[in-house]
Image (cartoon, coloured by chain):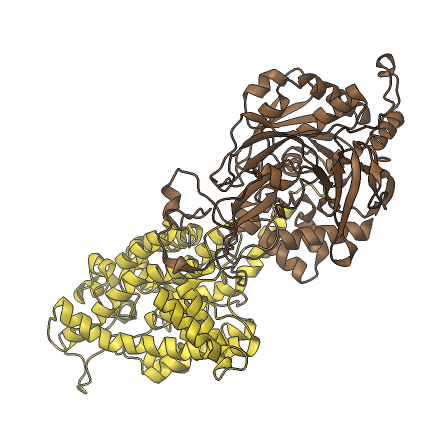
Chain colours: A brown, B yellow
Amino acid sequence: MNAIHLKKGFSPRIAGTPGRRLQKLEKPRHVGMVPKQIPFIKPRLLVKEGDAVRIGTPLFEDKRNPRIRFLSPGGGTVTRIAFGPRRVIEAVVITLDDEEFSESFDKPATDQLATASRAEWVELLLAGGMWPFLRSLPFMDLADPDFIPPAIIVRLGDDEPFAPDPVVYLEGREDDFSSGMDLLGRLCERVILNLTGDDSLKSQLSGQMEMRCFSGPYPSGNPAVQLYRTKKGADENRAWFIDGQAVILLGQFLRTGRYPLERIVTVGGSLAPEAGHLLARAGVPLRMLAGGGPLKKTAARYIVGGFFTGFSGSEDSYLSFYQNALNLIDDGDREEPFAFIRPGADKPSYSTAFLSALRKKPFPMDCSQHGEQRACVNCGTCARICPVDILPQFTMKCLVADEVEEALAHGLLDCAECGLCTYACPSKIELCEVLRSAKAQYYKEIA
Amino acid sequence: MKILKQLFNATRSHFETGGKLAKLHPLFDAIETVAFAPALPTRADTHVRDSLDLKRFMTFVIIALLPPFFYGIYNTGYQAGVASGQTPGIIAASLAGAWVVLPMLMVSYGVGLFWEILFASVRGHKISEGFLVTGLLFPMTLPPTIPLWQVAVGISFGVVIGKEIFGGTGRNILNPALTGRAFLFFAYPVNMSGDRVWTAVQQTGQQAVDAVTAATPLALSPLAASGETVTRILADAGYTFQRLFVGNLPGSVGETSTLMILAGAIFLLVTGVANYRIMLGGVLGVLAVAYPGYLLNLSSGGETARLFSVHPAWHLVMGSFAFGIVYMATDPVSAPGMNLSRWIYGFIIGALTVMIRVFNPAYPEGTMLAILFMNIFAPLIDHFVIKARLSKRVPNV
């Protein structure tokens, strides 16, 4: 077992940490899928409004590889398909029947588990809608079923505020987890379990396969950062990764032969009516997660996922495929008198330019940009905070000048898209957006 | 606060497109955003942002400049009084100093702001708070006897040639305030060097009284006749180490007091606004050149490079080294961006400062030239440091 401590990065102390107590959420009336929050996918709809679907009926496939399909998280009727600008599919909404029917998938019999070939496992995962849980670095696109990766990283414990705690989602589901791990072992020879956070899991899981323990500030739970810190050669760059909770779902899928619906979701942030873990189902409406009722007086932002990398949603939106957290914080849309000179005991900052540097209490953060955009003054804060040692200020300038080769040499593809550079930039430059869009552009060109 | 907001709301229409003063919109915007940080929620991901912005960043430099600035006002008045044969009290000296320094400051801000607004209006940019630092730094580097029209010319050169033609704050290669000062230094040397410009004697038409020399320590040093040590000359003129440290002597408005500059430096370092590597590198650079020189001088008699005969620590408190290394060299835009580069950059500035002082009698002070020289080389140092660093990465293409 390897223990790796990350020094770079930053964890702001944010108010509204979800507790570990798990509550069960009642069944929603409708569920939804949000294809536009799945990176790189070009969705082709397989259903139309009014169609009856079962749990596990394919809703849409990826035009780039039609074998990869996304299944329905509920049984009932497709009541609404919402399109955004340029026909982007914003949501596929399914109104649930009281009694839901489920598709079943032909899993290998228990005695055939050992003899089934990799191709058979891949086909099963593709058909069962489980394949999309596997994603590939460095672009974080869906994994290519025809490619054998150098390794699969299992990310147990996401330290982005506030993702579900592995202690909570592993409890009572250890068997599913280990059969999920076995399944991954059939796809790739090397499966690495990367553990972030609670030490109690370490002893519980030891004896499994290759395991590493990460500690340090955010984003030590990010698989791209974990790979960057552990890789020995360039051949490891194309590793895949999967979230710990998805491994449990793999095991559950294997046990039941049905598309698993349960997700353990966190609701956090200073405006969350009750911050905690919820046992919800895939595609649950955000309104339900947020307690159903109106929030506190200030305007809230619904962040699906973490504070740094999540998507903006609204109460009418749905939990997306990869995100298992809803964060509710103040939208911050208001002017602040003389903000630049306030002592700032309540202003969180990476710098020591505020009295908050002396404070230990968590801050109720808001979504204000806290200043206007300016030219880069080369202060170097982004380079100091970057967990994968990119020099975001120089790389950004390379990209603005169209020097893509130089940006690649700077380690552009190692960028974990954690958002810390954008967070810390005093000139309020969207560094992460510049880097990420350059990565995506490059990916489209080489694809 | 409400009244202020109403005032902005009432006048805003004049500054918007179609209004009478639409061309001055950057000025209105600058004033309004100082009073009220605008409501700007983040658009997409990275939903939360750090509270530090460039306004606060630059404001902190101004706060750090206040101790030497106020001391400079007092000292200017005090030196003027002494030169006229009086010993003014703290209030009288401050008033007399303010009478000299504040007009310089007003001209610097006024003329500089004119250029800043002009360029911002034409380009459709916002007025950068970086100018507020330049506008304060610049008069602090000037001798108190400078004619105000030269202040205007100097700040114009600094802002226009030193910054705006490159694209504004963040894109300049030279420190704008130093660029302006260097321009004045070479264009109007009579007003910028020699031993008559450092004390603002009131307009009596007389020179400083004989008993009190107005020469700065650095201007004095090369005057040492053969066989005399510089330490002796300085001691004769009443310059002790302690006096140099406190700064009670003629010189540019803001540069004299190492003590006050140190206070500013601590503030900059604690708040993380300036980089300690540059400052520490600079000090090491001074000592690295001055110490061996001092030792050699001790052993050989040192006729050629006489300034080596002062103790190396004196180089840290003489002239404008402290001011330059704390406020000018740490300007993040014109300094390099890599940590190793910052050490190298600071070190060479320190080393060059001493070398110019010691070996070049034409320029008694070397800090300004050393910093400007290294401004030019900053990207080159970065280039090699980045290259070395990238060679260690595991490639990922």
As drawn, B136 above or below A241: below
Please tell me whether residue B203 is drawn above or below residue A354 in the rendered image. Answer: below
Q: Give the residue at x 54% y 82%.
A: B18
x then y, percent, for residue A214: 58, 29
Residue B363: quadrant of the picture:
bottom left
Residue A314 or B62: which is nearer the viewer? A314
Quadrant hosting residue B222: bottom left
Q: Nearer the viewer, residue B346 or A286?
A: A286
| Residue B159 appears in the picture as rendered | no
Q: Quadrant of residue A266?
A: top right
Figure disc tally: 0
- Examine the rendered structure and indicate whether residue B312 appears above or below residue A140: below
Determine the residue located farthest toward the front in the rendered image. A98
The quarter of the image holding the N terminus of chain A is top right
Q: Please tell me which residue is depicted at 71% across the width and 33% down the height of the picture.
A: A241
Residue B86: give x, y in percent of width and height.
Answer: 10, 74
**Residue occupying the far top of the picture:** A111
Query: In this rendering, would B93 be left or right of B354?
Result: left
Q: Is residue A67 visible?
A: yes
Name the spot of residue A53 as percent of width and height, x first. 83, 36
- Location of residue A399 with respect to A287 vertically, above or below: below
Can you give x and y, in whole percent of width and height, for residue A38 in the image?
73, 44
